Amino acid sequence: MNALDDYGVSIRFLEPTEVPAAFPLVQQLRSHLDLAEFTARVSRQEAIGYRLVGAFRDGVMVAVMGMRKVETLARGAHLHIDDLVVDEKERGRGIGVGLLTFAEAHARKEHLVAIFLDSRTEVISFYEKRGYAAHSALLMRKRL
């Protein structure tokens, strides 16, 4: 049971057959993807432990989050959250908090000691209010 049950929202891992239904939500954040590329990328990432989590209100998916266990020399074993997206019409109702709570409980169950995620500037305060802080490592990228 999760804290959002009283609001008619349940959170759980998606079944493989539900992945395409997550696409309209992910597209709100990743508009460059089409359905075929989205499902292909999810399929490739699932091979290395990636899981999609959905939040459902009355049987309709209203939010989605990707997450995966990662281990690096610098950070050790941790959970990485990818693409937490709450439908525009559902924002501000605690669903994003519910997804983070789900991820944190999963990380604890897996004996992981940290969660990392990438954030857009406009939602940094959402994460900071929940105890997340900027990491000292600077992300670098080179397009090839």
Image (cartoon, rainbow, N blue to C red):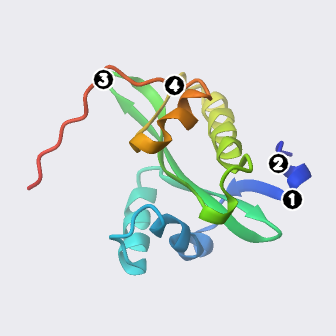
If you read the primary sequence from the N terminus, does the residue marked by circle 4 or circle 1 appear first?
A: 1
Residue 21 in sight:
yes
Q: Picture coordinates of residue 8 (x, y %)?
A: 86, 59
Q: Which mark is residue 4?
A: 2
Callout 1 secondary element? loop
Residue that label 4 marks: 114
> What residue is shown at x 40% (from left), y 44% (from top)?
120
Q: Which of the two residues, 92 or 61, is positioned nearer the viewer here? A: 92
- Residue found at x 56% / y 53%: 65
**Image-based side of 37 in relation to 29, left or right:** left
Q: Earlier in the sequence, mark 1 or mark 3?
A: 1
Question: Quick one: label 2 or label 3, which is nearer the N terminus?
Answer: 2
Measured from the top left, where is residue 116 in percent x and y? 45, 33
Q: Residues within 10 Å of mark 1 (few under 14, many from 20)?
A: few
Residue 134, quarter of the rendered image: top left
Dot in front, 2 or 4: 2
Amino acid type, label 2: Leu
> Residue 119: in sight, yes or no?
no
Residue 39 sits above or below residue 3 on the image: below
What residue sits right under mark 3 in the picture? 73
The residue sitting at the left extreme is 144
- Disc 2 from disc 4: Cα separation: 24 Å
Residue neighbourhood size for the residue with mark 3, other residues' Cα within 10 Å, grouped as few (<14), some (14–19), many (≥20): few
Measure how far apart labels 2 and 1 are at the Cα level: 7 Å
Residue receiving disc 1: 8
- Nearest to viewer (mark 2 / mark 3): 2
Out of 109 and 30, give the one closest to the viewer.
30
